[in-house]
Amino acid sequence: MTTPIITIDGPSASGKGTIAAIVAHRLGFHYLDSGSLYRLLALHTRQQSIAWDDETRVAAAAISLPAKFIDGHSWLNGKEVSATIRAEHIGNGASQIAALPAVRAALLQRQRDFCAEPGLVTDGRDMGSIVFPMALLKIFLTASQEERAERRYKQLINKGESANLPQIKLDIINRDVRDATRSIAPLRHESDALLLDTTQLNVDQAVEKILMWFQEKQAS
Ligand code: DC
């Protein structure tokens, strides 16, 4: 029997990270937030003064990236950096380095190594299309740009950070365009992925829907 994998791909701020983590927890599966690997690499290269468009050096850094995930927290070089990698400028850097083919190639096996019994839930942009094409259940999770901007805005305000809604919306639009138009592994809804639009759904409703689809896949 092959290890069951659920892939959840979708645009920035669609809520896929929150939903994927809960689904993993409910099933007792491992969880990989692939975006955080790109974010850790963006932070690491910035700390090493490697330019985000220097493909050769960023890819070399990816191969030896001193990153670890422990209990849902991200570590870089022995330091907990979970909050640091969530900063908007690191997200933008992650999006830039993610467009470099050599960088994606360097991170491929590292992502595949997260697949282990009893199963894996993973979220990102190309989890179902490139990294785990054999996944049992593939989901494309999205929400309208307005809704995603508002969620990100509320998240920042709740954290006590300053936030500017029009600017967040613009960032989301730009990130969507860059992630969807890059030549390698662009973000798109592949035909074998089930569409889950959460514009009108709360987290619990989205989680229940995914668990139901998973049961159906397992039974078929
Ligand atoms: O999901 P996120 O916002 O944490 O991801 C940060 C950036 O990393 C995003 O702009 C695109 C990139 N990314 C990617 O290209 N492929 C993935 N599987 C995950 C993230």
Image: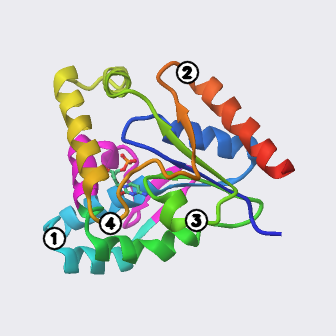
Front label number (2 vs 3): 3
Residue drawn at (27%, 64%), measured in percent from left and top?
183
The label shown at residue 116 is none
Dot 3 alpha-carbon crowd within 10 angstroms: few under 14, some 14 to 19, many 20 or more? some
Of helix, strand and loop, which one carries label 1?
loop
Of helix, strand and loop, which one carries label 3?
loop
Nearer-N-terminus badge (4/2): 4
Ligand 1 within 8 angstroms of badge 1 C-beta: no
Q: Amino acid at mark 4?
A: Ile
Of helix, strand and loop, which one carries label 4?
loop
Of helix, strand and loop, which one carries label 2?
loop
Q: Amino acid at mark 3?
A: Pro
Nearer-N-terminus badge (1/2): 1
Nearer-N-terminus badge (1/4): 1
Residue 124 x %, y %: 46, 52
The label shown at residue 50 is 1
Nearer-N-terminus badge (2/3): 3
Q: Which residues are magenta?
A: 68-96
Give 112 or 183, whichever is nearer the viewer.
183
Dot 1 alpha-carbon crowd within 10 angstroms: few under 14, some 14 to 19, many 20 or more? some
Front label number (1 vs 4): 4
Alpha carbon separation for disc pair 1 and 4 = 22 Å
Front label number (1 vs 2): 2
Q: Which residue is mark 4?
A: 184
Residue 179 x %, y %: 30, 51
Q: Which residue is mark 2?
A: 201
Q: Amino acid at mark 2?
A: Leu
Q: Which residue is mark 3?
A: 133
Which color scheme does this rendered protein use? Answer: rainbow
